[in-house]
Amino acid sequence: MDDNLWLMELESALLDDCTVNDIYSICNGKSIPEALRPDVWQVCLDVRHKNDQLVSFNEIFDLPFQRQLREDCDAVVKRLGNDDEDKVSVVSDLESILTFYCKNRSLKYGQGNGWIELLLPLLSLKLRSTQTYHVVRYYNLFEAIRDAYIPKGCVKQGNVFHLFRLLVLYHDPELCSMLDTKRITPDLYSRTWFQSLFGATCTLPVVLSMWDLYFQQADPYLVFFLSLIMLVNVREKILAMKDESKETIVEFLSNMPCALEPDDVVDFCSLAQYYAMKTPSSFKTDMLQTLFGAQVDSPLDPVVAQALCLPVSVYELVDNASMETPHPEAVRFFLVDCRPADQYNVGHLSTAFHLDSNLMLQEPVAFATAIQGLLRAQRQSIEANSNAGGEHLCFMGSGRDEEDQYTHMVVASFLQKNTNYVSLLTGGYSAIHEYFGDHMIDCLEDHDVHRCLVCCGNSSHAKNNNTARNSARAPAQAPSSSSQAPQTKITADLFSKLGASLKSKSQEMKGKLFEYIVNPTTNAAAAGQNVAEKHVSASEKNGRRYRNVAPVFSIDDENEEPANAAAVKAEPSSPTDETDSKEIVQLQAFLKQPDVVTSFRCQEVHMNGRMFDSHLIVTKTHLVVLRDLGKGQSQVIVRRHLSSIVKITAKRRHRDLITFKYGVPDGETLLITDMDRFLIPNASNATEIVSRHIVQQLENSKNA
Ligand SMILES: [Zn+2]
């Protein structure tokens, strides 16, 4: 009886001008009868009253890639079980719709771009009315799905896949790290999932019922979480494949959706929603324009492309802390303030746990104790159901590069331990500071305007960062808090009002760094040499050493740091990719080679904080970096000729963090072309040996 009731309700709603919300509440997850599906989808995708765009179609099939398009339509339809007469009309509909789509939107069709697979489930709706009218309706549905639900730039290294990897990392760092180690980037296996909303990989009944839920849900990000569930669902199987070849794993992953049965769809989608709820959500707002909307090439988003972990924007953090009665499963943050103590002491959020990132390198024992304290405090505040306590660790740096590289190392160390739910506050403390504007006096604790680095704005450097950030994210609303009644004492309630009215200017560590490359800083004093130093692109690598002078080991000035960071971060490829096509060797065999002088166990430190267990090998002529792959295998990351090393530096405060700089002379200046950084226990021993061999090598070449 009940069944009939909701169906009647749905039918009558469809006859009226109903909305997607009406349909959602009437259907309540029940499966939609085939006869009503076309109408339901048209309401959900808001195309019921859309004009006939095809009136402008000249019906001339003359695209440069027309032949390819026709052949592909033909080939796909051949595989379907329809009778021949049916096939001819399906091929012709496909080709008409896609040809018009290309012309209407000035797009190019590319083989395997998912369009055909996205259209086929629509054609199965068998819309029939007047002769051409059904084509119009297919077209409108197709265009609406593409605009609303298919992420832009589904290409290798596209924003989509960077973001997807971050989501996997957030929920399953162990799985993510295994796939990273195998150099399996998400585009390799999930591209068709995103391009066709699983249309290309699932059976038609599965696709239809998944799309029923999808379009009612009206959440464009659902595909990310559906894809995440695909992986997490069989994580044990995937982890067990760690010794299989990359190709075998990619094939297994790509085919996972084929196993879905129609009965699984509801569970699958609810699980995806559950994971979506357990994920910080500010990335959704911040990336909406980059990822969705009319399909044009969207530029690479530097925040996501270079992120160490999932970025969280200030407005989400503040909103989250002021939620009165959150859903028990919703994201609750535990904020970890990683700034140096002197900065924390002159202003911080009352909810923040302080973990001085400098301790990690300076006093590892104290750091380990601090971590224990952190975990205890987190457990206690979760038990107390406090606003400040949650499972989700949100790390916060200062927003200044100098300190933040240590924050990144702390974050990386948590990720290495496969800690779930790790995020990083975009823009760090400066972003919080800016967010509160004139009200910060009520929102920050122990805030001392005379000693607060953000207030003092003492370094022009910090100001530049702000400008870069603002111009990069121009439309973001400035926190015009001065216009809000300053006499009112701000309470937690106001936090949520601010949160709703202010848009984050989600800035990034990386974007501003590119400034340094465009305007290389010359800093002879800091470089500890008489020649000025310029930083150039990492691609110009091979060079003679400068004036045949051995590099002087020096203790770095901290101020020099941003320039260093710029040069290294300028490498466009991700850490997983830059090692592509490098040779794999047996570590022990490699160490026994006759020209090996010595080796050091160390960690290779990337500028974004990622660390890799490695060996640094000194041969008679080269410095070789081997990354541990496990089981005695290592990957040759880079070989540097000893004579290309022009500088070896340690940090003043972190003497085991060693940077090797490579360069070439350029007139009177020295061009730093590249650098590697390592965390080496007892580093002075290592640097001494390397320096000695460089000198030796120079002598040899002089005598030769
Ligand atoms: Zn301040």
Image: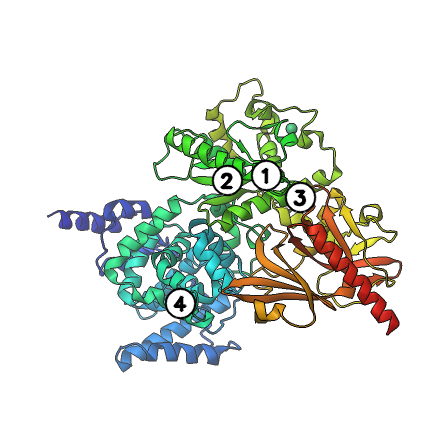
Left or right position of 453 against 156: right
Labelled pair 4, 3 in contact (Cβ < 8 Å): no
Labelled pair 2, 4 in contact (Cβ < 8 Å): no
Left or right position of 386 against 476: left
Q: If you read the primary sequence from the N terminus, does the residue marked by circle 2 or circle 4 appear first?
A: 4
Percent position (x, y) of residue 526? 81, 46
In the image, 120 versus 231, the foreground residue is 231
- Kind of residue sitting beneath label 4: Ser
User: How far apart in space, not on screen, are marks 1 and 3 (Cα)?
Assistant: 10 Å
Residue of label 3 = 401
Label number found at residue 254: 4
Would you say residue 635 is visible in this rendering?
Answer: yes
Q: Report the quarter where the C terminus lies.
A: bottom right
Q: If you read the primary sequence from the N terminus, does the residue marked by circle 2 or circle 1 appear first?
A: 2
Residue of label 1 = 428
Can you tell which of label 4 and label 3 is closer to the viewer?
3
Left or right position of 86 against 506: left
Label number found at residue 263: none
In the image, 354 versus 453, the foreground residue is 354
Would you say residue 127 is visible in this rendering?
Answer: no
Residue of label 2 = 394
Mark 3 burial class by Cα count in 10 Å: few <14, some 14-19, many 20+: many
- Kind of residue sitting beneath label 2: Cys
Could you tell me which secondary element the residue under label 2 belongs to?
Answer: strand
Picture residue at 47% right of the left edge, 67% below the top: 188
In the image, 631 versus 428, the foreground residue is 631
